[in-house]
Image (cartoon, helix red, strand yellow):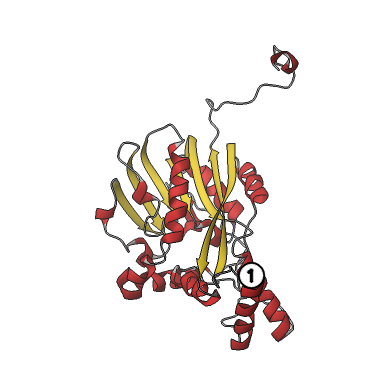
Amino acid sequence: MFRRSLHSPYQVFDRSVKRLQRDSAAALRGGAKSRTVDYLRDEVADRMMDRFMDIKRNFGTILDLGSGPGHFSKLLVPERVRKVLMIDSSEKTLHRDPDSEFEVELGRIVWDEERLLDLVQKDSQEAIVSCLSLHWVNDLPGTLVQIKEALKPDGVFLGAMFGGDTLFELRTSLQLAQVEREGGISPYISPMTDIRDVSNLLGRAGFTLLTTDIDEVKVNYPSMFELMDDLRDMGEANAVVERRSSLHRDTLAAASAIYKAMHGNEDGSVPATFQIIFMIGWKPSPTTPVPLKRGSAKRSLKDVL
């Protein structure tokens, strides 16, 4: 019997717009266009797989939440995982790539990532992973609670999401240009979460044995405009509810000039920083290791040192 989840009252992002953006990106040239910008998600999936391999356990089924076309799932091998269930709200993104590109048994379900417990039962999943999709959910605390509830006791969650310093070069350039040309700032890049918030939210959601760390991926582009084109083709265009549909041409020109002046490389290219927060949390169980009580040590640390 499925449990009915409580839907978030918070609406930072327009989820229907985000789904349409990602459908459109995945459909360009039969998916060929979006494959040219897989470089970022493929790199993050590789780094996430390094962390997954540190988990010394084999799994029957893994749920890949917000899987996209399967950047992480394509790296899974039968020696560690029998089956992966990919869930994504964008049908065209989910079905972009053929089954032949995966080594493990595969299932795909079109579903809203914010409503996980409307789809799966509580205490039913061995492991849940999420690679670069959680930054688009409206209620991150609630989604983390749903992930924890869906896991079996001693189940593991492994995730990667964009951190607060992602695209800081583009963000500051656009803000300065808007102030200069328009006399104010409107949201053009989505808000992000920092690692302290993620650690706190994982703990509040009920996860234990937490591990969080930050990595950076830096990519150089000929100019700000190529970066913005790639973000659109990735399906990462702005989807904030109060967003502006476009910026004035002179504001964009000013932002490009500011970008190069403040952040540009010697060869004329501009860098873009993608900050990635990696997280691992376990659902508590009777066998979960717990720290000893304070004062229960039998040897002094001074003696050991």
Give 120 or 75, whichever is nearer the viewer: 75
Instruction: Tell me which corner region of the image, top left, top right, bottom left or bottom right, holds residue 109.
Output: bottom left
Residue drawn at point x = 61 percent, y = 44 percent: 202
Give 225 or 234, whichever is nearer the viewer: 225
Q: Residue 268 location, x and y as percent?
A: 55, 73
* Label 1: how many Cα within 10 Å (few below 14, some 14–19, many 20+): some
Give 192 or 223, whichever is nearer the viewer: 223
Q: Residue furthest left?
A: 100
Provide the residue designation for mark 1.
171
- Whether residue 295 sits left or right of residue 208 in the image: it is right
Q: Residue 160 location, x and y as percent?
A: 52, 51
Q: Amino acid at mark 1?
A: Arg
Considering only vertical position in the picture, is 49 above or below 36? above
- Whether residue 240 sits left or right of residue 172 in the image: it is left
Under tag 1, what secondary structure?
helix
Q: Residue 204 location, x and y as percent?
A: 65, 44
Instruction: Tell me which corner region of the image, top left, top right, bottom left or bottom right, holds residue 99.
Output: bottom left
